[in-house]
Amino acid sequence: MLNPILHAETAGESNRYRVEPYVLAADIYSCPPWVGRGGWTWYTGSAAWLWRLGVEAILGLHRSDGELRIAPCIPPAWQGFEAWVRLGRQRVHVVVANPDRVSGGVATMTLDGVALDSNRVRLDPSLAGAHEVHVRLGLHALDSVAAYSA
């Protein structure tokens, strides 16, 4: 529903959608006579939805209360990805590897070379510095089902 290109794949769909197919719309109308028409493009609210979709739902990078939870849900064909995240004055380089070609499930995770027993990283936000987090996706996951729902 969020992917704008899926609303404009044919000429008829594009005529109904009537907004840019490369910009996330904040609204898709559902009442006649505007059913399927997009609205509120280039709006900060729609940008926030795109951020949440890409960074939180797909890459699985969730910041909350000074903590970074990593729970990717990526296509199995992806070999992995890298991202930089700020936690206070700290920079965290996240490197995710997907050798088993799974969609999700953190099998192992390290912070600066030290194994973690969960998919969460907590750093002192008052300190400055850079850190390296390595994540390996796999079938035997550290993260629980509850970690995906928060």
Image: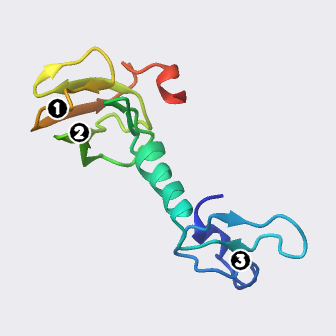
Q: Quadrant of residue 142?
A: top left
Identity of the residue furthest to the front in this view: 126
Question: Position of 71 compared to 52: left or right?
Answer: left
Query: Element under label 2?
Result: loop
Residue 34 drawn at (x, y percent)? 83, 75
Depth order, front residue of 115/63: 63
Give the residue at x 63% y 71%: 40
Amino acid identity at mark 3: Tyr
Q: Position of residue 73 (x, y in %)?
A: 45, 40
- In the image, residue 6 above or below residue 69: below
Marked residue nearer the N-terminal end (3 or 2)? 3
Question: Which amino acid type is marked by label 1?
Answer: Ser
Neighbourhood count class around disc 2 (C-alpha, 10 Å): few under 14, some 14–19, many 20 upward = some
Which disc is residue 17 wearing?
Answer: 3
The residue beneath circle 1 is 126
Q: Is residue 36 left or right of residue 125?
A: right
Three-letter code, disc 2: Gly
Mark drawn on residue 88: 2
Question: What is the crowding at mark 3: few (fewer than 14 residues within 10 Å), some, or many (at least 20)?
Answer: many
- List the single residue furthest toward the top: 117
Can see residue 75?
no
State which mark lies toward you, 3 or 2.
Answer: 2
Q: Nearer the viewer, mark 3 or mark 1?
A: 1
Give the image quarter of residue 45.
bottom right
Q: Secondary structure at mark 1?
A: loop
Count every numbered label the image shows and give the total.
Answer: 3
Going by the image, does 52 lie left or right of 77? right
The mark that comes first in sequence, 3 or 1, is 3
Q: Position of residue 25 (x, y in %)?
A: 61, 68
Q: Residue at x 56, y 67 (%)?
A: 24
